[in-house]
Image (cartoon, rainbow, N blue to C red):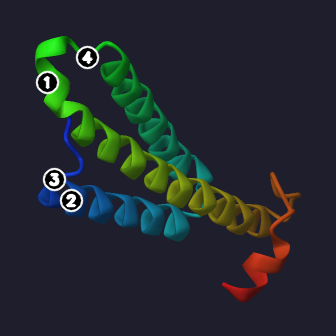
Amino acid sequence: MFIFDISNILNLILMLIATILLIFLAQELKKSYITGIALFAYLILLIVHAGQMITLPAEFRDMLPVLGRCIAIDFVFIFITFFAYLWVDDIEAKKMQKKSLDNSLDWLWKNV
């Protein structure tokens, strides 16, 4: 059974670098859909890992801790990309002089 193991340190570092570069690109271009795509990809990855954990055959039960770590890492990346999406959406809204998608985190953006 193939498992995209992002708990492996090399995969984790590569995913982190790719996420940071996507966030930087979205911030430079002032396009929130770029971070939205990354957020959507991590949500799909979480669904895949959860589905694999649920349908795991008995002979692969030793992979449960790996899948658990992968799901935890998925949640961390979802958290990071969600706040990055809100941040870039705020930047994009200020550039286009329109109302942001969500202004509930204004206290945070003032400190960033």
> In the displayed structure, does residue 78 sit left or right of residue 13?
right
Q: Nearer the viewer, mark 1 or mark 2?
A: 1
In depth, the one of 14 and 6 nearer the eye is 6
Say which mark, if any, is on residue 2: 1
Front of the two marks 3 and 2: 3
Depth order, front residue of 24/97: 24
Question: Which numbered circle lies on residue 40?
Answer: none
Residue 69 percent coordinates (x, y): 31, 47
Nearer-the-camera pick, 27 or 52: 52
Instruction: Please tell me how crowded label 4 is: few (under 14), some (14-19), or many (20+) other residues with Cα within 10 Å.
Output: some
The picture quadrant where one finds residue 10 is bottom left
Which residue position is annotated with label 3?
8
In front: label 4 or label 2: 4
* The C terminus, quarter of image: bottom right
For marks 1 and 2 on the same chain, the one whose residue lies earlier in the sequence:
1
Q: CA distance from mark 4 to mark 3?
A: 20 Å
Mark nearest the camera among 1 and 4 is 4
Q: Which sits earlier in the primary sequence, circle 3 or circle 2?
A: 3
Q: CA distance from mark 4 to mark 2?
A: 26 Å
Q: CA distance from mark 1 to mark 2?
A: 19 Å
